[in-house]
Image (cartoon, rainbow, N blue to C red):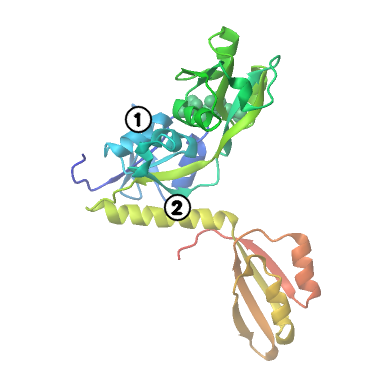
Amino acid sequence: MSDARERLRIAVQKSGRLTEPSLALLRQCGLSFRQSRDKLFCYGDGMPVDLLLVRDDDIPNLIEQGVCELGIVGRNVLAEHQGGTGAASTSPRVVERQPLGYGLCRLALAVPGGRGYRTPRDLQGLRIATTYPRLLAQFLAREEVRAEIVVLSGSVEIAPRLGTADLICDLVSSGATLAANHLREVATLMDSEATLVSSAREPTDARAEIQELLLRRIEGVLTVRESKLVLLRAPRAQLAAIVKLLPGGVTPDLTAVEGDADEVALQALCPRAVSWPELEAMRRAGARSLLVLPVDKVLA
Ligand code: PRP
Ligand code: ZN
């Protein structure tokens, strides 16, 4: 258990697919980090938040042990830690707080080029190499298939070539790793993306407020990534029709235009991008001076 601390700690993958986008997200939240010599612990400027750069698979354990409060991992890592539908997941100590929308990938089965595969039944008696033994075991149990799970800590994709497994169960993102190793994806066990995780127990000291603030900022950054501010002018009579065309069913702010009782200025924060056809439809409905702007920050 951790002692009372004044500063929050967030753990991020040291080197991998999630490292750069995760650090970019934290920078957008107003954090900057002083790189320490060992690069494992980085002191945060701008907010009382420090960064731990570690192996992604270690992050749920570090949170459980109270070494850090927050972490960014693939949902697959969290699911593996929680042990799927096992007893451990009935009251998880590490919980998902916020999907982050990047690091999209899937946990999949892949077979060497020459091997056929039609249904999970075909896996009966085979050896499957993976770094996700619990998720794989859960899948095999669900499909009522007996196969041998060969647990590896990395480089799973070369196991079939080395003869230590017949096929693999690994993360696939672009598919480049599979292609380079002449492996063919045949079934998906779960879809995944980067997600913010934390201890199920909220901190009770100064860290509670910092955590709340950081979560709000992350939410704000995610919102603005998609958001657009739409500005336009329209005759009052056409307003209802134009508002219906705004993406996301948003309620706009309306302002009277000085010297023109008939004209209204509209401002709307839309939750997604606005396409040219949507903009043209608003123009046909009577809107003028249409402007779509990117959003830099949002604070609810
Ligand atoms: C995964 C997986 C593959 C690679 C697949 O590793 O183990 O090596 O990504 O990506 P691709 O389909 O785009 O080639 P990850 O980044 O999760 O790192 P880790 O397994 O070392 O934690
Ligand atoms: Zn990993």
Q: Which of 251 and 78 is in front in this view?
A: 78
Q: Where is residue 5 in the image (x, y as percent from the top left)?
A: 21, 45
Q: Which dot, 1 or 2, sits closer to the camera? A: 2
Q: Mark 2: is the Cβ under 8 angstroms from ligand 1?
A: no
The residue identified by callout 2 is 218
Furthest residue toward right: 284
Q: Where is residue 34 in the image (x, y as percent from the top left)?
A: 36, 38
Residue 21 is tagged as none
The residue identified by callout 1 is 40
Identify the element where label 1 is drawn: loop
The quadrant where residue 95 appears: top left
Identify the element where label 2 is drawn: helix
The quadrant where residue 283 appears: bottom right
Q: Position of residue 294 (x, y in %)?
A: 61, 59
**Residue 209 sits above or below residue 174 on the image:** below
Q: How crowded is mark 1: few (under 14 residues within 10 Å), some or many (20 or more)?
A: some
